[in-house]
Amino acid sequence: MAEKADRHTLYEISVQNTEAEFEFIDSTFKRLRRRRPITLREDFCGTANMSCEWVRQRKKNAAIGVDLDEDVLVWGRANNIKRLQPSAQQRITLLRDNVLKVKTNPVDVIVAMNFSYQIFNDRDTLRTYFRHARRGLVDDGIFFVDAFGGYEAYRELEEKTKQDGFTYIWDQASYNPINGEMVCYIHFAFPDKSKIRRAFTYQWRLWTLPELKEVLEEAGFRNVTVYWQGTDEDTGEGNGVFEPATVGDADAGWICFLSAEK
């Protein structure tokens, strides 16, 4: 089963919820700017799943996806973009480029999701990226990222989540408390005992929320806001509703969003 599986498809099923992300970004932008966002740049776009969601939602929406990995861009074109209506396909542009240097027309929204910006493991480079993202926005544009943390985020552990026909395994393989750097893997396991080991590898720095807010402000952004997830009373798990917050719970693990206004 592992030999027949596609790691990008498994990733999208396990990790991404682009419809919910679109709803959050769209509603937050409208609340802050009193208008709907039209143009999106998806940095570290991978398979361009979010870009596809963006153009699917409204007929006027347009998206630009940026990634350095040509192979994953090819996969995205063949498996995601080609499934769109022809008119929607024309509203997506994919660029093989470096997010630190890419030049595009200014857009309403730039996103860096799935913690992808954590590849920048020193403050100067992270600030350079945030500053470059700010330059890529229109005058009232907004930059969105997600973040994770909690005391289990610093542990070396494996978390298994059962999906339909396979198991998603998040492996925090190592963490260095001196410099904040961590190595994580995604594995996939199947009912026939076969596995895709290290389907994806991440060498990150685990940035804290205070650090992210500070660096965003140093890059010139204003009104940096954290959106904390509410709790389902029945399960004790996150309920998928993110609200502006200045105080968060000291949970074992949490995921949140940040918006930074130009």
Image (cartoon, rainbow, N blue to C red):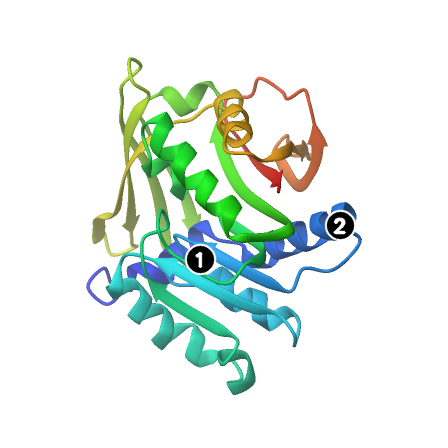
Single out the residue that lies furthest toward the bottom.
86
- Residue picked out by circle 1: 13
Side of 66 where 178 appears, left or right? left
Which x, y percent locates residue 180?
A: 33, 21
- Residue picked out by circle 2: 33
Side of 124 where 213 appears, left or right? right
Amino acid found under the numbered disc labelled 1: Ile
Which x, y percent locates residue 239?
A: 66, 40
Tell me the distance, in whole angstroms, between the alpha carbons under discs 1 and 2.
32 Å
Side of 45 where 23 appears, left or right? right
Label 2 environment density (alpha carbons within 10 Å; few <14, some 14–19, many ≥20): some
Q: Residue at x 33, y 35 (%)?
A: 120
Residue 183 shows in this picture: yes
Label 1 environment density (alpha carbons within 10 Å; few <14, some 14–19, many ≥20): few
Tell me the quarter of the image containing the N terminus: bottom left
Residue 113 shows in this picture: no
